[in-house]
Image: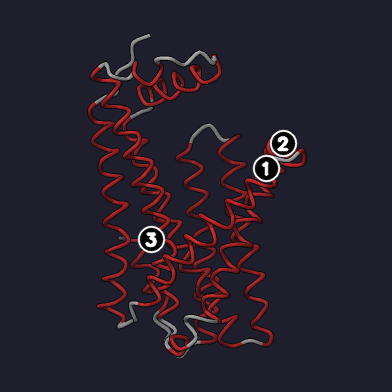
Amino acid sequence: MDYSVPTLSIVFMSVSALTGIVLPIALLIFFRKKHKTGIKPFFIGCATFIVSALIIERIFHSIILNSDIGKMIQGNIWLYGIYGGLMAGLFEETGRFIAFKTVLKKEIINDKNALMYGAGHGGVEVFFILVFSMISNIVMSIMINTGAATQLTTGITNEAQLQAINKTFELLSTTPSGDFLMSIVERIAAVAIHLSLSILVWFAVKKGGKCLRLYPLAIFLHALVDFAVVVLARYVPSMWLVLAVLYVITACFAAIAVKVWKIHSTDNDIEENITNVEAE
């Protein structure tokens, strides 16, 4: 079967990939210039995400998901959502906690550094998700439109692999062009969530005592949103509706972060900061 990817789809893929580069830089400049934060928390946030989520968490997944228990988890969307959410929450929020407790110990005096850290943590995730995935889609789409896609299937005799490749061709060809902008909408919400969770863990480290409860709260909230998105994506036919629910959850998380900030920080313009990031 012949496939063809609309030019507009490729344009929107390119816009998404460009956003993956521009958004993290814009966040860095925004918090640095307007709120006088340090630069170090941004890059520590980037490094922490890479180490905790892309390296350690993936190693853990490779062990668990390749086991008999892992096969059972992957066979049940509810178990998979719970497992994935908990692991993401545990590894990423623990990474935040350790970063604030160690390499950012001296920066803890300026609460706005929590926002810069969140920008780095969420920003580098934007980069990896949007840039890498969209570039892959663009390259494959161009190959499809130029007839070069046959090179991807030449020599493959495994029927399952052929079906998977052809399914990718079909998705790229039939997906509405506007849907390739969904990732931008989703990543904006994700960045706001990372800012909110960074605030919770920041004050858990800075204040200690009863505030330490904010750390497990951050793990729970992270797990909750990931679980909700995974399950909703399976059962809700419209991804735009799933994104609408995601934004409601994001608003709730931001409200919690604002309340925590107002209680524990002398700088109370956090609500404006988060609103500005969501609006950009």
Q: Residue at x 34, y 81 (%)?
A: 38
Q: Farthest residue toward the top?
A: 1
* Quarter of the rendering containing residue 96: bottom right
Q: Upstream in the sequence, badge 1 or badge 2?
A: 1
**How many other residues sit within 10 Å of disc 3, few (<14), some (14-19) or many (≥20)?**
many
Could you give the CA–CA distance between mark 1 and mark 3, rounded to whole angstroms?
27 Å
Position of 176 relative to 181 (above/below): above
Quarter holding the N terminus is top left
- Asked if labels 3 and 1 touch by Cβ distance under 8 angstroms, the answer is no
Could you give the CA–CA distance between mark 1 and mark 2, rounded to whole angstroms?
6 Å
Q: What's the mark number on residue 138?
A: none
**Residue bearing mark 3:** 123
**Residue bearing mark 1:** 65
**Residue bearing mark 2:** 71
Quarter holding the C terminus is bottom left
Residue nearer the viewer, 232 or 156: 156
Q: Amino acid at mark 1?
A: Leu
Q: Amino acid at mark 2?
A: Lys
Q: Secondary structure at mark 3?
A: helix
Question: Where's residue 143, x and y in %?
Answer: 28, 23
Colour scheme employed for the rendering of this structure = secondary structure
Q: Secondary structure at mark 1?
A: loop
Q: Residue at x 63, y 73 (%)?
A: 215
Q: Amino acid at mark 3?
A: Gly
In this picture, residue 95 sits left or right of residue 37? right
- Asked if labels 2 and 1 touch by Cβ distance under 8 angstroms, the answer is yes
Q: Secondary structure at mark 2?
A: helix
Question: Where's residue 156, x and y in %?
Answer: 47, 16
- Picture mark count: 3
**How many other residues sit within 10 Å of disc 2, few (<14), some (14-19) or many (≥20)?**
few
Q: Residue at x 39, y 15 (%)?
A: 154
